[in-house]
Amino acid sequence: MNRIVSLLVALFLPIMLPIHAIAANTVLSCDAFASHPTPIGTLVNNVWNQQAAGKARWEQCLLQRDGPNGPEYGWRWRWPATPRVVFAQPQITHGNTPWTSHPTPQSGFPIPLTGLDHLTISYAVTTTGDADFNLATTFWLTDLDQVPPQADINSIRAEFMVWSYASDNFFSTPAGRKRATVEINGIEWEVWVERRWHDTSGTNDNRWIYIAFRSTKNYLDITYNAAELVHYALQRGFLDSEWSIADIELGNEVMRGTGETWVHKFRVSTPALNTDNI
């Protein structure tokens, strides 16, 4: 009898362990645009183009789990195979996005471009699944030097993106036209620009300049000085030195499929914020 019990335990243990690991994840929220503060930033369940899924079933949730060095945060998603569009951008953020109101804004923002010499972005993530997605930091730039209490999308002047990763079946290029390939921070970047970009969901009709620095190699673990990328864009006339950075968002632009991302590290460092991990 003991041999039979041992055999049954041996057979079922490999099945039970993954189930236990999944159960250890805490779902913080699956609500559209839910936000959750964490020690390394605010998680946001951004589903800005959810209507493109039509009647197809989809899910996107914010997650927490116990990591080797304390709590870790992330998100998971499941989106339909068609249409071939970006449905959402689950993310972890710092600052005050111009797309929503901020009754209690985060201090240290907006960050003026004038005099910006040091803005280090450092992160490490892992992503699993069969999805089409990228990994990018988005900086929304406005012409305001203070945070308005209400959303002010008409203040948006630029969407400044830094792509460090794209899966094989994600869009082959960012929006716009390729303007250059440059080496900055010891990393080779393609520079893409679209001077009159817009909300491709069709919800809003305001326009802004879109600039993307796309690394020519894929990185899920990277550190770079975003101020040097900003300086390049200023020198080329793509940005205006009178503008400011309203917020900084690290996230996945997600298309079809199922995926799960865990953020092991996300640090933003600049003297304007007087901190290394806001």
Image: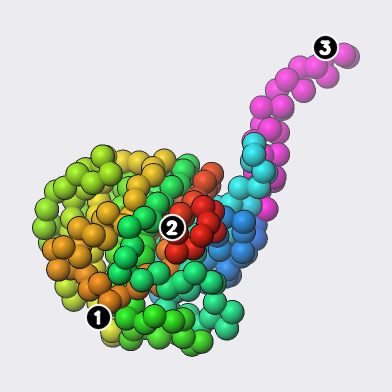
> In the image shown, does 80 or 66 lie closer to the viewer?
66
Residue type indicated by callout 3? Arg
Look at the image and give the residue range highlighted in magenta: 1-26
Viewed as shown, does residue 33 lie left or right of 87?
A: right
Q: Which residue is mark 1?
A: 207
Horizontally, residue 53 falls left or right of residue 58, namely: left
Identity of the amino acid at label 2? Thr
Q: Nearer the viewer, mark 3 or mark 1?
A: 1
| Prevailing secondary structure class for the magenta stretch in the rendered image | helix
Marks 3 and 2, the one that precedes in the sequence: 3
| SS assignment at label 1 | strand
Which residue in the protein does label 3 denote?
Answer: 3
Q: Which residue is mark 2?
A: 270
Q: Residues within 10 Å of mark 1 (few under 14, many from 20)?
A: some
Name the mark nearer the viewer: 3 or 2: 2
In the rendered image, which quarter is residue 236 located in?
bottom left
Label tally:
3
Task: Report, in whole angstroms, how far the alpha carbon at label 1 lies from the one at label 2.
Answer: 29 Å
**Residue 269 in view in this figure:** yes
> Where is 222 relative to 273, above or below?
above
Q: How much space separates mark 3 and mark 2, taking CA atoms?
A: 63 Å
Of labels 1 and 2, the one closer to you: 2
Instruction: Give the x, y percent position of residue 222.
Output: 39, 42
Please give the name of the residue rendered at 23% of the width and 64% of the height, measured from the top-left corner.
211
15 with respect to 233 (left or right): right
- The residues bearing labels 3 and 1 have C-alpha atoms spaced at a distance of 71 Å
Query: Is the residue marked by circle 2 packed among few (<14), some (14-19), or many (20+) residues within 10 Å?
Result: many
Residue 233 % position (x, y) = 20, 62
* Residue 45 in sight: no
Residue at coordinates 19% horizontally, 44% vertically from top-left? 183
Residue positioned 51% across, 83% down in the render: 101
Q: Earlier in the sequence, mark 3 or mark 1?
A: 3
